[in-house]
Image: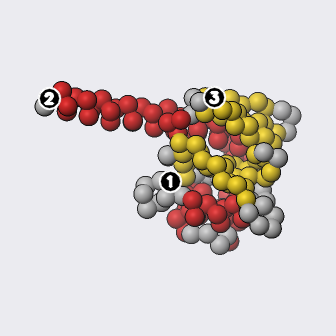
Amino acid sequence: MSKNNDIYIENRASSAAKKINKLNIPDEIKKQLIDKKVFDFWFNNKELRALSDNIDIAGGESIQYAASGNYDNHTALIICTNMRVMIINKNMFIGGDFTDIPLNMINGVSIKTRLFLSDIQITNGATNIFLNDLDKTAAPILADTIKSRSKNYQQSIQSAQYKIQQKILKI
């Protein structure tokens, strides 16, 4: 990224941190969002509150990045953690949708940038998940985070499996 883009992100993250601190969500979630410089959560206050019911902080799950976009024609919050990608949509009055994709199930991530917004496609086996109308600056950060966290997670699983196989061979 360019220096100007880094400054732009820092400014947006700083402004967002003030808004995040005012939200009625657990302090640990606030801290993680601020530490990861999440700045794009437009009209997602309900989704942010629902995040605390869906993230397993006690089990070691942590937010890596998050952004706002559209999923299945509804405004949604897309969160990449160190274990999965969560898509949370809380409807205006009642109900909502929650989708999660374990990182080891992600086969690919692609991004399409338009003039002002971007789209992300996550390939999960034979299924494609389309996330539309993400902020043009936040989308590549989210896509890169999903790619790298998925790769790291899959490598850690493979490493653990290899270690188990080696222990079995010694027996």
- Whether 146 is drawn above or below 27: the answer is above
Q: Earlier in the sequence, mark 2 or mark 3?
A: 3
Q: Is residue 78 above or below residue 58?
A: above
Q: Residues within 10 Å of mark 1 (few under 14, many from 20)?
A: many
What is the crowding at mark 2: few (fewer than 14 residues within 10 Å), some, or many (at least 20)? Answer: few
Would residue 158 be visible to someone looking at this image? Answer: yes
Taking the image as shown, residue 164 lies to the left or right of residue 147, namely left
Check the image and tell me how it is coloured.
secondary structure
Give left or right: position of 70 versus 84: right
- Label 3: few (<14), some or many (≥20) within 10 Å? few
Task: Name the residue that disc number 2 marks.
Answer: 170
Nearer to me, 91 or 121:
91
How many angstroms separate mark 1 from mark 2 (CA)? 35 Å
Residue 141 image point, x, y percent: 65, 40
At horizontal 26% and vertical 34% (from top left) the residue drawn is: 164
Q: Residue at x 66, y 32 (%)?
A: 127
Asked if residue 137 shows in the view, the reply is no
Q: Are marks 2 and 3 in contact (CB under 8 Å)?
A: no
Q: Secondary structure at mark 1?
A: loop
Q: Are marks 1 and 2 in contact (CB under 8 Å)?
A: no
State the residue position of label 1: 62
Q: What amino acid type is highlighted by mark number 2?
A: Lys
| x 32%, y 33%: residue | 161
Considering only order in the chain, which callout, 2 or 1, is on the residue closer to the N terminus? 1
- The quadrant of the image that shows the N terminus is top right
Separation of residues labelled 1 and 3 (CA atoms): 27 Å
Tell me where residue 167 appears, x and y as whole percent: 19, 33
**How far across and how far down the image is residue 56, in percent?**
49, 58
Pointer 3: what residue?
Answer: 126
